Amino acid sequence: MTSTARTASPSPAGEKTPPLLDVDPYSGPVLADPYPFFETLRETAAIVELETYGVYVTGRYEETKIILNDHDRFTAKAGIGIHDIRKPGKFRIPNRLLENDPPSHTSIRGVLTRILSPIVVRRWREHFEKEAVIFADRLVEKGQFDGVEDVAESYVLHVFPEAVGVELPRREALAIGEMSFNQAGPDNELHRAAVKKAEPYLDWYDRSAERESMRPGSIGEMLFEAEERGELEEGVATNMARVFVRGGMDTTIAGIGFTLNQLARNPDQWAILKADPSKARQAFEEAIRHESPSYVNFRTTTRETELSGYHLAADTKIGIFSGCANRDPRFWKEPERYDLTRDTAGIHVAFGFGTHNCIGQMIARLEAECILKALAERAESIELTAEPSYRPVNQLRTLAELPLKVTPRKAA
Ligand code: HEM
């Protein structure tokens, strides 16, 4: 428990205090199925205070966008996890891009935007597509496989590290990812177990983002070149290479898993994709709207402020549950339904919104599009052979297993 010591100050006339909610979003049952909590959160109020942790949270679409687009009142500098990383005992090295505000954020983001330009990303397309075809041929021949381990993890861990420029052995990469997404939550058993699991790989992790480990022509190498030219402060290239690995791997794996799960559960949607495999990107985009990998990200109030009629205390964490906002019926029609024809790209908040919206989203889309399209071109049907299971992680929603069966396309 990380209760925030808050100095009580009376709310100005007309402003209400956010109601208290006695639910722990990091408890086992809620992590296993957060949707009943999401509904309670959205329907209780626009902003509520979580009694267990003394933090504010929102699950509504409108407030999510307001908070994420206002770094002046809601800073990212105190960390995007539940702890204030500026406070004694809670310090950890911040993510120099995400846990930062303009103007410093703007100058780093400018350099990264140039490095991740559409031309650079387009150059990877050919390679990603070629590899996806090899994967899909193998999967269809196999017939039965795990959508997490054999598709999402294997494909992402094959193509993504090459683009970032680092070596990512599977066991090491998955252990570090799990530690990182648990670290942003409370100091619970999940966090402690993940740290223990990752401990043997911490030295490898330190070395993996050094200058000499970067592949030529990769994002990593371009980051170090920008640092050498003085465009990035010393230390930012290493920090960013690590952030790309941590932030871009598990999220994309989760998103591809969610898409396969929904396609297998909804034969009408699979039929749409099979008829036109170029809709693979839409299938992915709607899947991460319907079930969002990023569970909760925090900002911190910079002063006493008001939001949607609620009085918020200064220096207090406020969490945004993007998967909850992505099903807010105030904004979405039939939000529980997976409908790949829905117009979602740039509208859902699975990639965040505003100042810190995901800078790697075109890479995630490219990976997902390539593997899903290759599969849709080769498989006639896709179905679940058992119910999927979820892996509990404090700050990430992701699948553990997704047992699938596909049949090969019938000759035309
Ligand atoms: C489906 C896959 C992905 C999802 C769901 C996702 C989600 C997000 C979200 C929600 C944010 C905003 C966090 C906040 O505002 O607190 C974000 C930011 C970010 N993401 Fe992603 N991400 C994905 C893939 C990637 C990839 C592939 C990369 C790297 C190549 C990446 C790198 C980043 C970085 C560096 C930021 C910080 C941007 C900034 O502060 O300006 N992400 N992502």
Image (cartoon, rainbow, N blue to C red):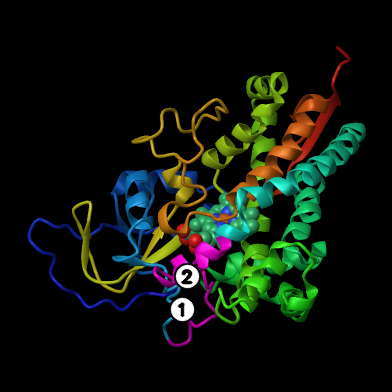
> Dot 2 surroundings within 10 Å: few (below 14), some, or many (20 or more)?
many
Is 332 on the left or on the right of 180, as rendered?
A: left
Is 315 on the left or on the right of 259, as rendered?
A: left
Query: Magenta-highlighted stretch: main secondary structure?
Result: loop
Q: Which mark is residue 99?
A: 2
Q: Quadrant of ligand 1?
A: bottom right
Please state the extent of the stretch shown in magenta in the rendering. 88-112
Quadrant in the picture for residue 137:
top right
Is label 1 in a helix, a strand or a loop?
loop
Given contact means CB atoms under 8 Å apart, are the residues at marks 1 and 2 in contact? Answer: yes
Q: What x and y, as percent, mark residue 164?
A: 72, 61
Q: Nearer the viewer, mark 1 or mark 2?
A: 2
- Residue type at the position of mark 1: Ile
The reply to whether residue 294 is visible in this rendering is no
386 lies above or below 253: above
> What residue lies at 65% left-to-right and 20% top-to-bottom?
272
> What residue lies at 47% left-to-right and 52% top-to-bottom?
352
| Residue under label 1 | 85
**Does the residue tagged 1 have its C-beta within 8 Å of any atom of ligand 1?**
no
Viewer-closest of 290 and 227: 227
The count of marks equals 2
44 lies above or below 115: above
Indicate the quadrant containing the C terminus: top left, top right, bottom left or bottom right. Answer: top right
Viewer-closest of 269 and 364: 364
Quadrant in the picture for residue 122:
top right
